[in-house]
């Protein structure tokens, strides 16, 4: 089982990417499960994913990185025992800190995780305001990413995109930073984070 963790604030484009990636993997014969965390009692993204016949597991009424951290571990163990997926995609709420999520994974005791990768999705249209108001959280999402995707490059100005890229590179010089828009081939992203899907 391989684990992909997506972070990014509401509206950054996380869900769209998660759906595309899940469909991409399934078309290649992989068993995929998506663990979605929404703060409210009803998960809108979860309903959309189910309509697309995706295997969705919900963690509701709390944040995956604090009150529901034990729920993530037990969900992963249940997934391993009952479904044995090749790939688990975890999409936490936009307010989730990846440090807290990654810190609970050693408590998972199912089949070994072959890989754990983290993707941070940045919205260049709101990057400056989010960084001003949520500095520590935005910084953590970037600093703990293996790959940073600057989304909405079709809507943002070149200056907004460049600013988001520079912020990402300054906060995490080790991560690969890619620009992404709806017409970007998914293979570009997959080659960086999950080459075993090709």
Image (cartoon, helix red, strand yellow):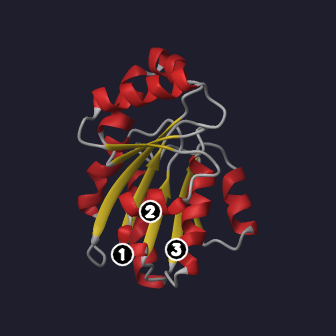
The spot of residue 120 in percent (x, y) is 43, 43
Which mark's residue is nearer the viewer, 1 or 2? 2
Q: Quadrant of residue 169?
A: top left
Q: Earlier in the sequence, mark 3 or mark 1?
A: 1
Q: Relative to residue 147, is residue 122 depicted above or below? A: above
Q: Position of residue 196 (x, y in %)?
A: 36, 74
Question: For residue 25, which numbered disc appears in the image?
Answer: 3
C-alpha span from label 3 to label 1: 13 Å
Closer to the N terminus: mark 1 or mark 2? 1
Residue 108 image point, x, y percent = 29, 66
Q: Are marks 2 and 3 in contact (CB under 8 Å)?
A: no
Given residues 181 and 113, the one toward you in this image is 181
Residue 109, located in which quarter of the rendered image? bottom left
Secondary structure found at label 2: helix
Q: Identify which residue is drawn at 41% across, 68% down.
A: 76
Question: As drawn, which residue projects farthest toward the front?
Answer: 158
Q: Residue at x 36, y 36 (%)?
A: 142
- The crowding category of the residue bearing disc 1, from other C-alpha atoms within 10 Å (few below 14, some 14 to 19, many at least 20), is some
Q: CA distance from mark 1 to mark 2?
A: 17 Å
Mark 1 — residue?
A: 1
Q: Which mark is residue 127?
A: none
To which residue does mark 2 refer?
190
Q: Which is nearer the eye, 142 or 105? A: 142
Is mark 3 in CB contact (under 8 Å) with mark 1?
no
Q: Quadrant of residue 198?
A: bottom left
């Amino acid at each position: 089982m391989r684990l992909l963790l997506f972070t990014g604030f509401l509206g950054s484009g996380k869900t769209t990417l998660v759906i595309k990636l899940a469909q991409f993997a399934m078309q290649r014969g992989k068993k995929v499960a998506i663990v979605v965390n929404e703060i409210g009692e009803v998960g809108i993204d979860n309903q959309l994913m189910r309509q697309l016949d995706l295997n969705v597991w919900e963690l509701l009424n709390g944040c995956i990185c604090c009150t529901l951290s034990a729920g993530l571990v037990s969900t992963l163990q249940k997934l391993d025992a009952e479904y044995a997926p090749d790939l688990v995609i975890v999409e936490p709420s936009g307010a989730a800190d990846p440090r807290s999520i990654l810190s609970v994974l050693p408590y998972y005791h199912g089949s070994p995780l072959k890989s754990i990768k983290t993707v941070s999705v940045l919205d260049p249209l709101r990057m400056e305001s989010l960084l001003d108001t949520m500095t520590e959280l935005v910084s953590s999402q970037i600093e703990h990413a293996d790959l940073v995707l600057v989304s909405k490059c079709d809507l943002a100005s070149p200056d907004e995109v460049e600013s988001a890229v520079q912020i990402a590179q300054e906060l995490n010089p080790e991560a690969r930073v890619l620009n992404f828009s709806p017409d970007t081939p998914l293979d570009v992203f997959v080659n960086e984070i999950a080459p075993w899907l090709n």
